[in-house]
Amino acid sequence: MKIKYLFVAVAGASLTLSLAPFDWWWTAIIAMAALAASMNTASSKQGFLLSWCFGSASFATGVLWVYVAMHDFGETSAILATLMTGVFCIGLGLVPALLGYCYCRWVRDGIAGRTLGFAALWVLSEWLRGWVFTGFPWLYLGYGHLHTAMAGWSPVIGVYGLSFWVALSGSAIALCITAP
């Protein structure tokens, strides 16, 4: 069972590869598929923990600049900067964890819940992260797809629409893989 948590943590860490400077856009779809597939049979508590591991790992690889800002420019000790960055990533991981709880508790029944519900909750979690407590609009799924075939849609649907498309694609793949 613990391998499942490591699996989603690796998937979350790989999410950063979909963003600049790597621009491996497909890693976001695979990461979303891994998260959705791991939660399809999870309890609410397990969904919370799986999404928390996913989110914390994603932020751990995506916001390393926070450490640099505190240590190099803020002249904070390396130990304190590492500790504060870790707490920051763990705290930000609580936003996707809320998604996991809600998904496993109320949404994941049926095809629509497993796909549209997952994507809608993901976009809601991104919106909350960008709005609550003055916001932290970093590492949105849609940013990794600004230079793909979906780029033409970005002026129409925005970054949240692109994020919805990525989460929907990933959850549809997860449904195909895990469906009986």
Image (cartoon, grey):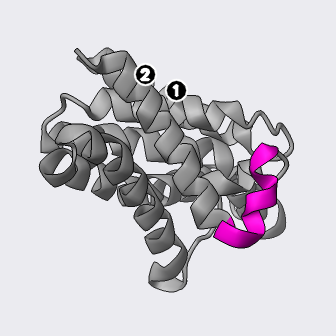
Residue that numbered label 1 is attached to: 10
Above/below status of 141 relative to 111: below
Residue 27: image quadrant is top right
In the displayed structure, does residue 141 sit left or right of residue 118?
right
Magenta stretch secondary structure, dominant: helix
Numbered disc total: 2
Q: Amino acid at mark 2?
A: Phe
Q: Which mark is residue 7?
A: 2
Residue 152 counted in the magenta span: yes
Q: Position of residue 10 (x, y in %)?
A: 52, 26
In percent of width and height, residue 76 lies at 70, 64
Q: Nearer the viewer, residue 3 or 76?
A: 3
Q: Quadrant of residue 146?
A: bottom right
Magenta run includes residue 147? no
Please tell me which residue is depicted at 83% across the width and 37% down the height of the picture.
22
Q: Which of the pair 82/178 is nearer the observer? A: 178
Callout 1: few (<14), some (14-19), or many (20+) C-alpha neighbours within 10 Å? some
Instruction: Give percent across and percent down for residue 99.
Output: 32, 55
Query: Residue at coordinates 85% horizontally, 49% vertically from top-left?
Result: 147
> Is residue 165 found left or right of 3 in the rendered image?
right
Q: Is residue 133 above or below residue 100?
A: below
In this orientation, which residue lies closer to the viewer: 108 or 78? 108
Tell me the quarter of the image containing the N terminus: top left
Q: Is residue 12 left or right of residue 176?
A: right
Residue at disc 1, secondary structure: helix
Q: Which residues are magenta?
A: 149-158
The quadrant in which the C terminus is found is top left
Residue 126 vs residue 3, the one in the foreground: 126
Q: Is residue 103 visible?
A: yes
Tell whether label 1 touches label 2 (CB within 8 Å).
Answer: yes
Q: Position of residue 103 (x, y in %)?
A: 24, 49
